[in-house]
Image (spheres, rainbow, N blue to C red):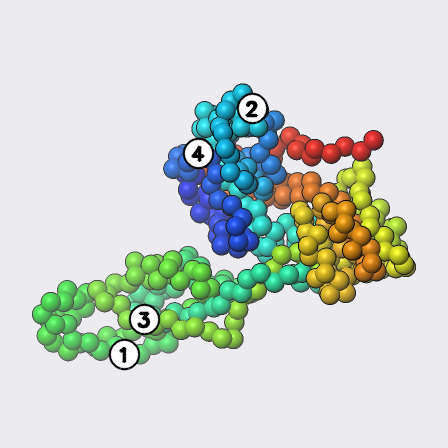
Amino acid sequence: MQMQGNEFIQRFKQYCPEWLAEEGDPVGLHIGTLNKKVDRIMMSLDVRPAVVEEAIAKKIDLLIVKHPPIFRPVSRLTTDDVQTKMYADLIKHDIAVYAAHTNMDIIHNGLNDWFCEELDVFDTDYLIHTHTIKMKKIAVYVPQNDAKKMRNALAEAGAGEQGNYTATSFTVNGTGRFTPNGEANPTIGSLNRPEQVQESKVEMIFPETKQAAVVAAMLAAHPYEEPAYDIYPLDNLAENYGIGRVGELKEAMTTEEFIVKVKKTFDLEGLRVVYPHIVKENIKRVAICGGSGEKFYREALAANADVYITGDVYYHTAHDMQETGMLVIDPGHYIESLCKEKMVTLFNQWKNEEGWNVDFFVSETSTNPFSFK
């Protein structure tokens, strides 16, 4: 099945919604259009001139990236400047660019979770709470013969997802009564005559962010001209999201053993370490936040972390960290390149589920600007 760019991004946003991004984070479509057929999609950490050259050579239609290419306003778009020429090259070759940034850090089964998996950190929780999504319940009345169709339509719209279960619902049967007036166009019954129908009441829960899609799906699947339905807010269910993770190693490690583990896990030539004045003998509780997460070190400390792993630690902030008694490891920003392989694995899973006729590529270009000598 050939696929439109909008179709792929719609599926992507079900997994990594834009509303999860931090305020002011310019996620979403940056360059080009999604209103086109896409055959070849590539995943990259960054958009750099060498990545654009790779995308052109591979005849890529859509580039998905972690870091937004236009994070700050571009004052001039000239092809004499290599930094801005890449934007013109992308447009010239009709390569769309879509960015998922902090929302990829926050989502469940996202980048920070993958870091923990690679480091064998278990029993994780988020480091900083960012979002609480409340749940709602829809109750809709349909003829009994249409109940299954309704349950399927609501499930496809995202209702009925509860923990490790999908399409959860409750159905009870009863009698519906109504009288169509002279202006009605009833599916069942006659004008101005009382009618009663054996109906099912279908109930399903859904996150408040999916209400518009759930209601639209219900209306589209309902046989009645005027469907009867209720939507209830739920106080006993909510889904929390946060950035960063904190969890436990299965067994404690010495500080030096753990530093070696981080280097080996992320295939690093070197990393920076902020040693506290009194070094802890063992590391057991680990906090991590990909990218530039130095501002969250106090939250890592409050979570009783023995070590905090994050990138781009500022010199003076490192002094403050050193006084806390917590070890800090700065492996660099580029460990986020883990997202390339992970995301393409996920894309191919969706491809198999949906029957898409599209090829996915992991960018082979290293965008790490740093080397160790």
Q: Disc 3 designates what residue?
A: 229
Say which residue appears at 82% left-offset and 48% top-offset.
273
Q: What element carries label 1?
A: strand
Residue 366 figure quarter: top right
Q: Viewer-nearest of labels 1 and 2?
A: 2
Q: Name the residue under label 1.
A: 175
For mark 2, what is the residue?
Answer: 81
Q: Nearer the viewer, residue 319 or 291?
A: 319
Residue at image location 76% in from the left, 32% down from the top: 371
| Residue pictured at 78% horizontal, 55% vertical | 320
Instruction: From the image, state whether disc 2 or disc 3 is nearer to you.
Output: 2
Q: Nearer the viewer, residue 310 or 179?
A: 310
Marks 1 and 4 sit apart, C-alpha to C-alpha, by 54 Å
Distance (Cα) linking label 3 and label 4: 41 Å
Q: Which amino acid does label 4 sit on?
A: Gly
Q: In the image, residue 288 lies at what x, y percent?
A: 71, 54
User: Residue 109: where, in percent of width, then height?
Assistant: 61, 54
Mark 1–mark 3 contact, CB under 8 Å? Answer: no
What is the count of numbered marks? 4
User: Label 2: few (<14), some or many (≥20) within 10 Å?
Assistant: few
Answer above or below: position of 300 versus 344: below
CA separation in Å, label 1 and label 3: 15 Å
Q: Quadrant of residue 210?
A: bottom left
Q: Which residue is drawn at 53% across and 25% down?
A: 85
Amino acid under label 2?
Answer: Asp
Q: Which residue carries the number 4 mark?
A: 32
Residue 293 percent location from the top left of the image: 68, 51
- The percent position of residue 232, horizontal first and vertical second, equals 40, 73
Q: Dot 3: few (<14), some (14–19), or many (≥20) neighbours within 10 Å? A: some
Q: Which of marks 3 and 4 is nearer the N terminus?
A: 4
